[in-house]
């Protein structure tokens, strides 16, 4: 079973609740979120997730340096959209798992993403 791990800085507005801007001219993605998604896409693209056994298991852990309460599942839409855009794997083939939150005052806030190939076929 294949697996990749990616870490990226936690940025403001990454939540599904804040990453879009609604205006009279339409709905737009925030520039910093689009750049973050591009970075994630380029990190996972060399793994050719489109060739992996589906569904993909995506787990998100969070390292933060404060005690703010953050709902990890709010990052799912942003992360899954970034992977789908690059790998062309429909997000209905993803299985999202909220990971753990680690408080480390000496580290920068970071999102740790683990993507695993399905073991469903191997288990049969």
Image (cartoon, grey):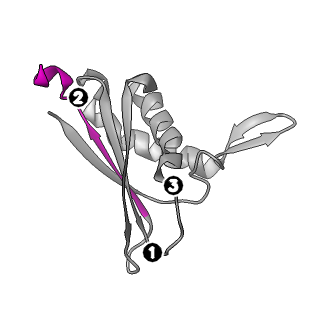
Q: CA distance from mark 1 to mark 3?
A: 15 Å
Crowding around mark 1 (Cα neighbors within 10 Å: few <14, some 14 to 19, many 20+) is some
Write the start and end of the magenta stretch as one range. Answer: 110-124
Q: What residue is rendered at 47% in x and 52% in y?
A: 72
Q: Point out the tag, 3 or 2, that comes first from the N-terminus.
A: 3
Residue at which label 3 appears: 71
Which quarter of the rendered picture does the N terminus lie within? Answer: top left
Residue at which label 1 appears: 65
Q: CA distance from mark 2 to mark 1?
A: 33 Å
Q: CA distance from mark 3 to mark 2?
A: 25 Å
Q: Point out the tag, 1 or 3, that comes first from the N-terminus.
A: 1
Q: Which mark is residue 40?
A: none
Q: What residue is rendered at 36% in x and 33% in y?
A: 95
123 part of magenta stretch: yes
Image quadrant assignment for residue 61: bottom left
Q: In the current view of this chain or complex, which residue is farthest to the bottom?
A: 106
Crowding around mark 2 (Cα neighbors within 10 Å: few <14, some 14 to 19, many 20+) is many
Image coords of residue 16 (percent x, y): 59, 45
Q: What residue is rendered at 60% in x and 52% in y?
A: 32
- In front here: 11 or 103? 103
Which quarter of the rendered picture does the C terminus lie within? Answer: top left
Q: Is residue 12 left or right of residue 42?
A: right
Crowding around mark 3 (Cα neighbors within 10 Å: few <14, some 14 to 19, many 20+) is few
Q: Point out the tag, 2 or 1, that comes first from the N-terminus.
A: 1
Q: Secondary structure at mark 3?
A: loop
57 part of magenta stretch: no
Query: In front of the other: label 1 or label 3?
Result: 3
Q: Secondary structure at mark 1?
A: loop
Residue at which label 2 appears: 118
- In front here: 123 or 24? 123
């Amino acid at each position: 079973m294949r697996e990749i791990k990616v870490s990226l800085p936690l940025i403001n507005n990454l939540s599904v609740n804040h990453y879009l801007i609604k205006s009279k001219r339409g709905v737009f993605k925030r520039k910093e979120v689009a750049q973050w998604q591009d970075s994630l896409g380029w990190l996972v693209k060399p793994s050719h997730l489109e060739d992996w056994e589906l569904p993909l298991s995506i787990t998100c852990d969070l390292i933060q340096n404060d005690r703010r309460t953050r709902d990890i599942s709010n990052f799912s839409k942003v992360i899954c959209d970034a992977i789908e855009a690059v790998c062309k794997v429909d997000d209905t083939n993803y299985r999202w798992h909220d990971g753990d939150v680690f408080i480390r005052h000496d580290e920068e806030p970071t999102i740790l993403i683990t993507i695993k190939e399905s073991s469903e076929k191997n288990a049969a």
